Amino acid sequence: MKKFDNNYDVLVIGAGNGGLVAAATCANKGLKTLLIEQHNVPGGFASSFVRGRFEFEPALHELGNVGNDQNKGDVKQCFDNLGIKIDWNLISEAFTILIPQEDGTQKIYKIPYGRDEFAKACEQIEKGSYEKVKKFIDICENCYFAARYLRESRGNPDVEIMKTKYVNYLTTANSTLDDVLRKLKMPKLIKFIIEAYWLYLGTTPKDISASLYAIMFYEYIEFGPYIPEMRSHEISQTIANRFEELGGEIWYNTKAEKIDVCDGKIVGCQTSRGYIKTNHIISNASPHIVYGDLIENDKVPNIERNLTGMRKPASQGYCVFLGLDISAEKLGLTDYSYFVVNSKNHDEVYEDMHDIDKNNSYIVVVQNNGCKSASEKGTCILSFTTLYEDAWNDVKEEEYFDVKNKIAKRFIENFEQKMNIDITSHIEEIEVATPVTFARYTGSKNGAIYGYKCYVNDSAYVRGKNMDLYYTIDGLRFCGGNSHFSHGYSITYISGEVAGNKTFGDIKAKQKGA
Ligand SMILES: Cc1cc2nc3c(=O)[nH]c(=O)nc-3n(C[C@H](O)[C@H](O)[C@H](O)COP(=O)(O)OP(=O)(O)OC[C@H]3O[C@@H](n4cnc5c(N)ncnc54)[C@H](O)[C@@H]3O)c2cc1C
């Protein structure tokens, strides 16, 4: 029997995207690394589940920032560095959006990715918009590379370089997306289309940090959207396997219960499988969990208490997953993702997200149109995703099943009517995930599925520049959607790489000083 070892260079808490890459990065640097995960599989949100003959994707719609060997995005670069190989599928369009018209009808726009393709499509929709859209994409590009520079300079950028090379990034740092698009005098309909990704994030264009949105927009439009062949589980399991190959250890079904801090330094962690001695912890569990539950109250520095209190968890996630006994083609769905909004005004869409009964905006993903082998021939997989603003907090336990099923029925019928198709009579499997489900499986506060809100006063610049200032307990670093950058697959992987590299740097610096 293997001897129980309780002494590690680094302990990583949580095997979500951030934790997996952080752990692999540490192991790749030769650090003795233990990764613990409270569940029996890796991935957190990035997983899969099976009902009947269907394997469902619980989270990923599209992964930005992947690219290919000729034009590598940060995710591909990070995975290449770690020797992680994934079978990627490139989706054929950015998204399809259904926009309601005053007369009760709707217009459907199929939007391509690719800088020029996107700008040309906008020009076709609204003459004279091409140059303005190109200008916006240039701003996005500058933000993307500025964020990369900030990461590479580990939060200590050369101010002169920032001022000369990344002007757009600095000028958008205190602006909202709405401000930037208005300044460019973007035509109304094109502005609405550019802003469509806010539906993923739950922070409206009038509130969202322009630089943060710009980075995400560039990741999708420049590199195109990707999904793995075998759901997110393929990515998570591949990283976990690679971590073990690199000499790392994973303990599943193991929960971090208490982090020990002595004189402002990490000294160990009580887990459900025993005590671990370590001076370095990277937490994929959120600061809310770490400072609220895992570290004794009087050991939490004020700056971190205040910062965690200041940030609001993002919107609550709700999904319906359907396995249908008909192919997508026969059903009449040819695209991969459909953005459905019930108003031409984002503020109204957002207002409705506060109300369980009113919210009728959602995103439909047709899994088989991104990955042909997603399910057996003659069948297909659909998912509906929407966000709520705290609306689920008022749902009583005894109403829970009725409420979740009522919303599912409403979305399905609404989409059937909009697309003039019959989904209901083809349902073979149906599953619903609510904020309660997401909170249960990942520990996310309130069932939020996108980390903390990306308000303009907490922009990518503020987060990137202050990544060391924020966390003051010696030996404690964070990764994942609730750490420095933001939510989403690409940035959570990158957050793990940054946290792993920084921890390696911390250890080397201590060894030099010793
Ligand atoms: C429905 C849905 C759709 C989405 N669509 C997209 C999309 O299209 N594109 C995109 O980029 N992103 C999307 N996202 C967001 C993306 O899934 C998340 O941003 C990302 O997966 C979060 O990764 P993370 O590193 O923060 O880890 P998490 O997934 O939050 O994982 C944290 C892990 O830590 C573990 N943990 C917590 N506490 C402890 C403890 N005390 N002890 C041990 N383990 C612990 C949890 O069990 C979990 O496994 C979507 C999310 C959802 C839910």
Image (tube, rainbow, N blue to C red):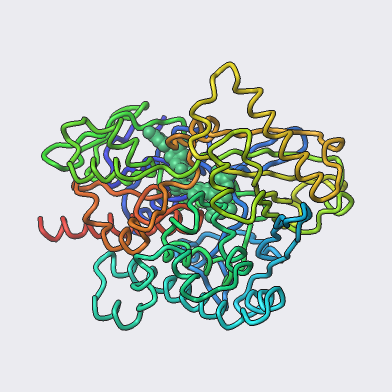
**Residue 34 appears in the rendering:** yes
The C terminus sits in image quarter: bottom left
Q: Is residue 237 above or below residue 509?
A: above
| Residue displayed at 63% across by 39% down | 319
Q: Give the percent coordinates (x, y) of residue 283.
A: 34, 44
Q: Give the percent coordinates (x, y) of residue 428.
A: 81, 34
Q: Nearer the viewer, residue 230 or 303?
A: 303
The N terminus sits in image quarter: top left
511 sits left or right of 8 in the view? left
42 sits left or right of 273 in the view? right
| Residue displayed at 24% across by 57% down | 468
Q: Is residue 419 above or below residue 294?
A: below
Q: Nearer the viewer, residue 468 or 463?
A: 463
Q: Give the percent coordinates (x, y) of residue 151.
A: 34, 66
124 sits left or right of 496 in the view? right
| Residue displayed at 63% across by 37% down | 358
**Residue 46 appears in the rendering:** no
Q: Is residue 508 above or below residue 188?
A: above
Q: Nearer the viewer, residue 65 or 331?
A: 331
Mark count: 0
The residue positioned farthest toward the front in the image shown: 103
| Residue displayed at 17% across by 35% down | 299
Q: Is residue 265 above or below residue 112?
A: above
Residue 270 occupies which quadrant of the picture?
top left
Q: Give the percent coordinates (x, y) of residue 272.
A: 36, 26
